[in-house]
Amino acid sequence: MFKKHSDRDQILIKRFREFDEARKYIEDISAYDTETVLSAVDYMITHQEYYYLLKNLYRQILEGKLPRNVYEYALMNMKVCPRRQEEKEIYLKILSTHKDVYTQPLVEFLKSCCSYLKEFNISLLKNDDPYIRAAGVDILTHCSDEEVKTAIKELAWREENPAVAEKIINYLKIYGEKDDKPLLEHIGERFPQLRELVIEAAEGI
């Protein structure tokens, strides 16, 4: 399970006393040694400069310059779940890259923040991109309630992508009830290649 906050010694935070001292290490991460960059990341997190940090991480993802270890460190050590609109827009942009090396750590982060970002996570189910819908189902599996169940079941009736359908089957395998068997049958008819998974899920509810 993704651990959102580590117990890493925070001594490095003291290296920077002002924003302008730390910012250059965030704006060009690959140009500096890892220890100094992590210190700058610590500064941004401690001072809740989440949007600034996230937008620079995203830009360097697009540039192909962001080391995964720095990216994962930043996500794991955020003491809160950034949830302003501009921050949620960056999450969506990262998911839209389809770069698993960056999207999967973000999915794990969003799972850890699921209750705080539930509305945003549910909105992923309505995205036109099946990659993002699949991520949404995956995330919501970790914070299911009646609102989430309703949203995922509504998606299940209309879903046309097999990768998303497989995520839904896995969800129903955990949270499905007897009256969901017609829904599973519908999925099995629409996606014959997933028939065995459907049968397995139906037998467990």
Image (cartoon, rainbow, N blue to C red):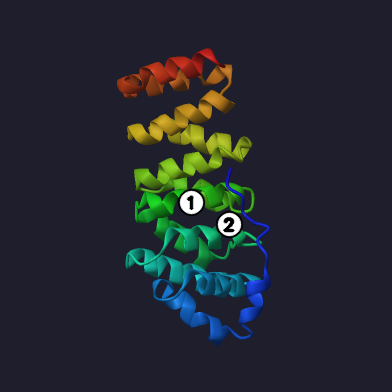
Give coordinates of residue 176: x percent, y percent: 56, 24
Give coordinates of residue 62: x percent, y percent: 34, 65
Instruction: Identify the residue shown where x is 64% and y is 48%.
Output: 115
Instruction: Identify the residue shown where x is 48% and y is 51%.
Output: 105
In the image, what residue type sits under mark 1? Pro
Please, is residue 119 above or below residue 74 in the view?
A: above
- Work out whether residue 16 or residue 201 is closer to the camera in this orientation and state it: 16
Q: Quadrant of residue 56?
A: bottom left
- Work out whether residue 47 or residue 131 is closer to the camera in this orientation and state it: 47
How many discs mark residues in the rendered view?
2
Residue picked out by circle 2: 76
Instruction: Identify the residue shown where x is 46% and y is 27%.
Output: 169
Residue picked out by circle 1: 105
Q: Is residue 141 at least partly visible in the picture?
A: yes
Please, is residue 107 above or below residue 177 in the view?
A: below
Q: N-terminal of the two: label 2 or label 1?
A: 2
Binning the other alpha carbons within 10 Å of mark 1 as few (below 14), some (14 to 19) or many (20 upward) gives some
Binning the other alpha carbons within 10 Å of mark 2 as few (below 14), some (14 to 19) or many (20 upward) gives some
Give coordinates of residue 181: x percent, y percent: 50, 17
* Residue 90 image label: none
Q: Is residue 89 left or right of residue 189?
A: right
Q: Quadrant of residue 59?
A: bottom left
Q: Dot 2: what SS? A: helix
Please, is residue 187 above or below residue 60 in the view?
A: above
Instruction: Identify the residue shown where x is 36% and y is 35%.
Output: 163
- Work out whether residue 61 or residue 149 is closer to the camera in this orientation and state it: 61
Q: Quadrant of the C terminus?
A: top right
Q: Is residue 172 left or right of residue 93?
A: right
Q: Quadrant of the N terminus?
A: top right
